[in-house]
Amino acid sequence: MASRFLRRLHPGLLLALAIGCGQPSGPPPSAVATDRPVPAGVLTIGSVSLNPTQEYEVVRPFADYLATNLHSVGIGRGRVVVVGSLSQMVEELREGRVDLLIDSPFPAVFVWQHADVEPILRRWKWGSDVYRSVVFTRADSGIGSIEELRGKIIAFGEPFSTSGFLMPKAALASAGLRLFNYEDPAASIPGNRVGYVFSNDAENTMFWVLKKKVVAGAINSDYYEALAGDRISELRILLTTDAVPRNVVSVRKSLDPKVVQAIEKVLLEMHLSDEGRASLERFEETTRFDRFPGGSEHDLASIAKLLPHVQEDLGQ
Amino acid sequence: MRLGLKGRFVVFVSAIIVAFGLVLTALSVRAQNERLRHELEDRGKLLTTVIAANTTDALAMLDVRDLRKTLSEARDQENVLDAVGFDEDGRVLTDGTLVNSRRHEQISEAELRHISGSSALLVEFEGDAMTVTKPVHLGSRMLGGVRLRYSLASLAEEQASLARRTATVGAVFALLGMIAAILLTEAVTRPLNEVIRATRALSQGEPAPRLPVRTTDEVGELAEAFNEMTRKLRDTTVSRDYLDRVLETMGECLVVTGPDGTITRVNRAVCSLSGVGEDELLGQNCRDLFRAPQGHVSLLDALGPDGSARGLETELLARGGEAVPVIVSVGTMEESAGRARSYVVVAADIGERLRHEQQKDEFVTMVHHEVRAPLTAVRGAIGLLDGGVVGELGKRGQELVEIALRNSERMERLVNDILVSRKLDSGRMEFHYEKVELMPLVEQAISAISAYAANYEVRFELSNGVAGATVRVDPDRMIQVLTNVLTNAVRFSAADDVVTVKASRHNDMLRVAISDKGPGISEDFRDHVFEAFARGEHDDWRHRSGTGLGMSISKGIIEELSGTISFETKLGEGTTFFVDIPEYA
């Protein structure tokens, strides 16, 4: 559930689709086994996506798992609300129609800054808790620093990717570079600008650089070595960003603290049980949840600082 | 284990069916394999071509994500083992997976050379896999290409499955073929077995059953031929039984020998005459049974050039050393061309006949010595009485003497005829041949009985058509023959009749035809004219005055002279006797 929105879509056109709203989910298997009556409380998980059906199918089992394990705090049912834009999600949170949001750092920080929510936990994915981005070029490109990217075209990945776009762009912008989006990788770029194009794929970015379609590219640092392979010697890294959490779990502040506490407990212990690990695996290969090592304020500070450079890219 | 006809036929037909099935199966499997391989290759080529076409934009835009998606879909296709997309330098961009472990790999030089200069497919086979490389061009620009590795394992599986199915079908057909072969063999051999059983029954002396003729083919013909054979064999058997009975009941001895004289068969008469059993006789040589004819070392040695003999007189050597006189005829049986002959010896016991001959001889001797001499004396005495040597007899006495003289003369003639006849029969009559003219003999004969004819007022009329013709005969015997015939003619002629005597040539012979105008010879008597003591029924005593031996003697003599005697007769008109004798130049 990275920030799934289209950067340039008009907010009014963003999908405001809430799947499962008002539709009681079927009782989870574990709930059937108990003799106690199912609580009437509902926990609503929000998600931003332009593919609401697929998103709903991904999130719903996770919501069911949570609801099943939150009976003690009056939650008997999980619900999923999928909306098409980040601003719509802010609205849903403000209205109290969404209780829980799990998203990438930049959207999470954006929501944190615009809605009454609280980042409570980190979400590990693919075995890692944080990631970085690298900006690289060919070793024979003659470019030795990011400043030398002026007048050149750089390739980013997908427009909604934190590591492939938001974070490296924000890092380059914070370094004083002025970045402008172009459609044509061969476009002529004025000397005071850094042009960028979307390759829409980290692998594309790697090959575009290697094949000199663009001068430089930015990708998740975890992919860099793998994608470069034995051609890594042909490349040179110009910039490595700070590490940022992969995903952030945010809760609506108005949510009952007991419920929030119970949610934290369930999420933090999920990876300890087979049932929990299976649910995590189905939920986009989530590894586990943990608390911010340095606290949310500290660990998300760099994101908050970079956010202004990509705020408009978040659709705001 | 030795297979019978049925077994061999089944094995043969089954072997043909199985071999045929194997060849067909092999050819079918081969053809199917080729077809499957080509289909699979075509599918691989087609898929690669389609994939290549779908990657043109991705390669042009260097959109590895899109390329990965396309190749990922290619990977999902059946039998696709690997799929890579590569750039114009031959470096792999993606293998269609997220991991993309083949990334940056360099394709082979050969593939690179191929895609660099051609837009055609490059197809390579390695083991159970086929690699199809298709370069992707955009206009004249080579963008790269795609390479799909296609599994032919399914081909092997399909081929194996096909081979199993074909083998199963082949086995079923082979089984059906064997069953058909067994049924066919049964249909073919059943009539043969029936023939075999019938033949065995026949060989064991049992009545041969009639075989059913079910078809009109060769088997049916065989059954018909067998039935025909048994029918003929049955007829032959009946004939043989009949012949056996004849041979066993015949009075003559029958001996069959091999070419070397070994006795292979005898009839009951042989055993009876020889006093030796059949078992003992079989295997002996016929020289141990028959004494060799005089002048020969064995019976078979006496055979003529044609291997036969008739009327050989010899002796059959009976048990105990007794020799039984027999007259033997020998015939030859040629069994087949080139095979040794067999001899059939028929022997008749002539002991009785010889005894009769001996008795005849004794009788003749007795007649000669005990009758003729006294008769001569009696006739002489009566002649003296008739001549008045003892004085004048009274009329009554003279009549009695004449009667006595006449009868004694007749008795003398009878005795003489009997002696002549016996000599002829025994072959002891002597002939003194000389060349003489025929006519004087005829004239002498006429003259000899002229007085006799005159007594009966019969006269002769001689016609000579062969003046000067000569014959080689014993003149006295020839005259005797003519005299007998002339006497006979006079005897049956009425007073004043003329007996014509005509000499002529007839069929290279000299003929003397003596004709009377007597009563002729009755139909019943014609066959007995030349028999001894044969006389027809006549009222006239004169006709009965002969001895009854004249014509018999005449026939015997004329045949000894190489001539013949015959007659033509017509009741109430007369008779003509023909004496034919070879002319002697």
Image (cartoon, coloured by chain):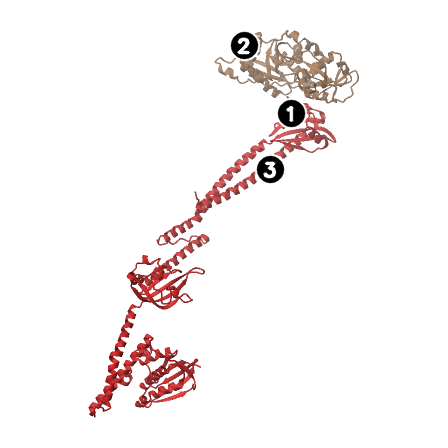
Chain colours: A brown, B red
User: On the image, numbered disc 1 is attached to which residue?
Assistant: B96
Of circles 2 and 1, which is in front?
Answer: 1
Residue occupied by mark 2: A73
Instruction: Name the residue type under label 3.
Output: Glu
Q: Nearer the viewer, residue A189 or B559?
A: B559
Q: Nearer the viewer, residue B440 or B159?
A: B440
Q: Quadrant of residue B29?
A: top right
Is residue B536 shown to the viewer in this render?
no
The kind of secondary structure element at disc 3 is helix
Residue B228: image x %, image y %?
Answer: 41, 57
- Give the residue pinned by disc 3: B34
* Location of residue B526 in the rendering, given as x and y in whole percent from the top left corner: 33, 79
Alpha carbon separation for disc pair 2 and 3: 71 Å
For label 1, the crowd category at 10 Å Cα-Cα, with few meaning under 14, some 14 to 19 and many 20 or more, is many
Q: Is B368 left or right of B61, judged from the image as shown? A: left
Q: CA distance from mark 3 to mark 1?
A: 31 Å
**Subunit ID for the residue under disc 1:** B
The answer, for residue A278, to whether it is visible in the render is yes
Q: Is residue B419 left or right of residue A145?
A: left
| Nearer to us in this view, B377 or B28 | B377
Which mark is nearer the camera, 2 or 3?
3
Contact (Cβ within 8 Å) of mark 2 with mark 1 = no
Query: Which of pointers 3 and 1 lies earlier in the amino acid sequence?
Result: 3
SS state under label 1: loop
Q: Position of residue B332 (x, y in %)?
A: 40, 64
